[in-house]
Amino acid sequence: MKNENMLIETGWNIDNSYAHLPEIYFRSHSPTPSTSPKLVIFNETLAKSLGLNVEELQRDTGVAILAGNRVPEGSFPLAQAYAGHQFGHFTMLGDGRALLLGEQITPTGERFDIQLKGSGETPYSRGGDGRATLGPMLREYIISEAMYSLGIPTTRSLAVVTTGEDVLRDSTLPGAILTRVAASHIRVGTFQYAARWGTRQDLQALVDYTIERHFPEVKGSENKYLSLLKEVMKAQARLISKWQLVGFIHGVMNTDNMTISGETIDYGPCAFMDAYNPETVFSSIDRQGRYAYGNQPSIAGWNLARFAETLLQLIDDNQEKAVKLAQEAISNFPELYQSYWLAGMRAKLGIFNEEMEDTSLIDGLLTMMEKYKADFTNTFRFLTIERPEETTMFGTEEFSQWYNQWQARIDRQQESKEDSLQLMKKVNPAIIPRNHRVEEALEAAVKKEDFSVMEGLLNVLRDPFAYCPEQEAYTELPPESDRPYRTFCGT
């Protein structure tokens, strides 16, 4: 009766359909209890949308679940197995510090994975302690919620709790657990794992499960496995184009960090670009620039080719025919991505229709931005609020010519100038989670236990298209430094 009451009080309505897959895909495992958990941030809006009781989840019984000390009724905690190409090298992986509690079924019948990240050692920890530290968990909370507000498909963050225990890394740091919410955690790497170590039946079970959960519309297709590949391609083309349109750099686009659902996942070494430069890299471990900003679309295509390889035996029994069909599908990815990106760039410039010269107009602006080290977000913000004189390119002959061409392009549309400005305001964020602002918030939280800086940042990021006075200070660029900004994989 106590568990039933807790279920009713907290609003958990948990199932775990993933646990019905063949056992090679997971290992049952319980979270490691936390000594003295404390809730440090809680996403009330997300909790309500999931059908959860906001008040109860912030009380001791609710926090106990978020800390891994208890599990909701119906939960079947498990660690998922997967593989992946990490910086081009294939390896066996798996949830080394995360556990899937199950799927929350919302009042509208939707399913969302509930995962605890940092909840202790798992069968796939590979010698690690399975714990996470406070800074990286808060970082994921900030960036994932910012991405959601920017309209970019993403996993989300329900809560962060401290465990009351120290975690030893380069120094002693406070331990923490993030509760992550996702459409699912099925990755390209999950399919790679199935293709390498599973049977054909194992692989088909995963594929059919994925179709049922994410792409039920392809069930009636003549070749549903080829259709699945094409739908995943569309989802990824849309996602990566959205990254590029706001200057987001994921930092570690390994195949185990590409979800089939098309959500952004894993916010370890990610960052947002300031000055426009396609070669921008922030991750300390990406020494060759494999995952640089300008490479993200081609890497997505490479990852999708690896996904296609896992489906070959299901696409057609004839290997040669299967390869041909898969190659034909994958060859369309660059054009598909380009169509989404170009449509997005037109919108960023207030362009409603299509003209052949649009590509050269866009390329001309980006070339100037790179040459004059113009800030990516602020350049489009200044154009949106009709303050071109504040761009670093203003006053040059190049910019004057480009600006006149752009204005002439706007004038050729049926829509009014005001319509164009309104369109730009809807797609050009006034603010992004600037790297120096994120670091400022994390330093205050981790070193001083002051969460007010983070709360202030989150408040202005909830509506990045507001263009309100409260956001003005958050548009400022970081102080000049001789040292490039570097990010690190979350630990």
Image (cartoon, grey):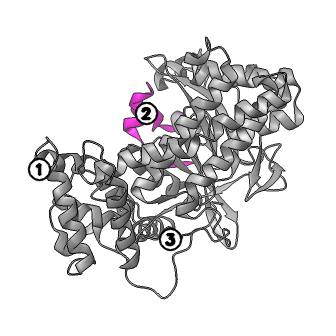
Q: Is the residue under label 1 in contact with that under label 3 (CB below 8 Å)?
A: no
Rendered image: mark on residue 47:
2
Residue 50 is inside the magenta segment:
yes
Q: Residues within 10 Å of mark 1 (few under 14, many from 20)?
A: some
Marks 1/2: CA–CA distance? 40 Å
Amino acid under label 2? Ala
What residue span does the magenta drawing correspond to?
37-61
Q: Position of residue 93 (x, y in %)?
A: 79, 47
Q: Earlier in the sequence, mark 1 or mark 2?
A: 2
Q: Position of residue 367 (x, y in %)?
A: 39, 70
Q: Toward which corner of the image does residue 70 lie, by quadrant? A: top right
The structure residue drawn at horizontal position 45% and vertical position 55%, both measured from the top left corner, is 244
Q: Which residue is under mark 1?
A: 417
Q: Earlier in the sequence, mark 3 or mark 2?
A: 2
The structure residue drawn at horizontal position 33% and vertical position 63%, both measured from the top left corner, is 377
**In this picture, is 165 found above or below 47?**
below
Task: Indicate the secondary structure of the residue bearing disc 2.
Answer: helix
Task: Indicate the secondary structure of the residue bearing disc 1.
Answer: helix
Marks 3/1: CA–CA distance? 49 Å
Task: Give the residue at the far top of this rendering.
Answer: 220
Residue 111 is inside the magenta segment:
no
Q: Residues within 10 Å of mark 3 (few under 14, many from 20)?
A: few
